[in-house]
Image (cartoon, rainbow, N blue to C red):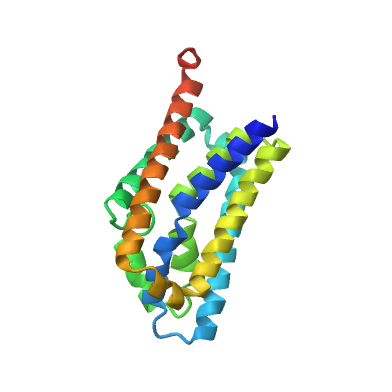
Amino acid sequence: MLGEDLKFAVVAFSAVFFVVDPFVAVPFFLAITKDDPPAKRRKMAFRAGLAAFVTLGLFAVAGGVIFRAFGITLAAFKIAGGLMLFLMAMDMMRAQPSRTRSSDEEQAEGLARDDVAIVPMAIPMLAGPGSIATVMVLMSRAAWKAGPTIAVFGSITVTCLIAWLLLRSSVAAERFLSKTTLHVLERVMGLLLAAVAVEFVLGGIRDAMPTLG
């Protein structure tokens, strides 16, 4: 049992971290806060990480209610979520901005905002459709069992904490993470995220057609 919980924890953290991908948020955060003083930048970084944590946590808790309200089966959501993650993974492997994360219009609006912590940094840059779908599917698999549930919320917490630390020290991070380094990291994360996406789709197919299991 402990081994299964540990395996699930590794999958959960990998899925949440790779789809949130806080490294990619660093250059975007720097671009839209370039005229802000360091103190304000640190404050916005904290609020962005906290807002992303709250958003993902709420969807993790309310996922089952949303399923029932809209008549969505777990199998269908797993397949839809997996396909969305796969599209994001393909963009990541090509080192291209994913429009499932944020659109050109949302990024342009962010440049004009005085405070970008909630929108567009937390939503949809960090807590976008892909990450929301991921935590909902993971919680459905956890089925509110103690070990797996702690793993999901722990993954959300650690990922958002890393995102906050990266954004908080974004100037130093930018010097360390060159464009080439970011592209390499993004491609590796994209490959791993594609594997997680395929696993989600296969799980959804097995749920829809039990005889395939």
Q: Residue furthest top?
A: 211
83 shown above or below 177: above
Q: Is residue 209 visible?
A: yes
What is the quadrant of the N terminus in the image? top right
> Is 87 left, or right, of 138 in this rendering?
left
Which residue is rendered at x = 55% and y = 62% of the image? 162
Which residue is rendered at x = 56% and y = 39% of the image? 138
Which residue is rendered at x = 37% and y = 49% of the image? 188
Q: Is residue 48 visible?
A: no
> Is 158 left, or right, of 126 in this rendering?
right
Q: Quadrant of residue 27?
A: bottom left
35 shown above or below 128: below
Disc tally is 0
Q: Quadrant of residue 86?
A: top left
The residue lying toward the viewer, choosing from 69 and 24, is 24
Point out residue 57 in the picture as x, y percentages from the top left corner: 61, 52
The residue lying toward the viewer, choosing from 139 and 10, is 10
Which residue is rendered at x = 48% and y = 35% of the image? 77
> Is 109 left, or right, of 200 in this rendering?
left
> Is 84 left, or right, of 11 in this rendering?
left
105 shown above or below 86: below
Point out residue 144 in the picture as x, y percentages from the top left corner: 69, 37
Point out residue 164 in the picture as x, y percentages from the top left corner: 55, 67
The residue lying toward the viewer, choosing from 164 and 40, is 164
Point out residue 212 in the picture as x, y percentages from the top left corner: 45, 15
Q: Quadrant of residue 81?
A: top left
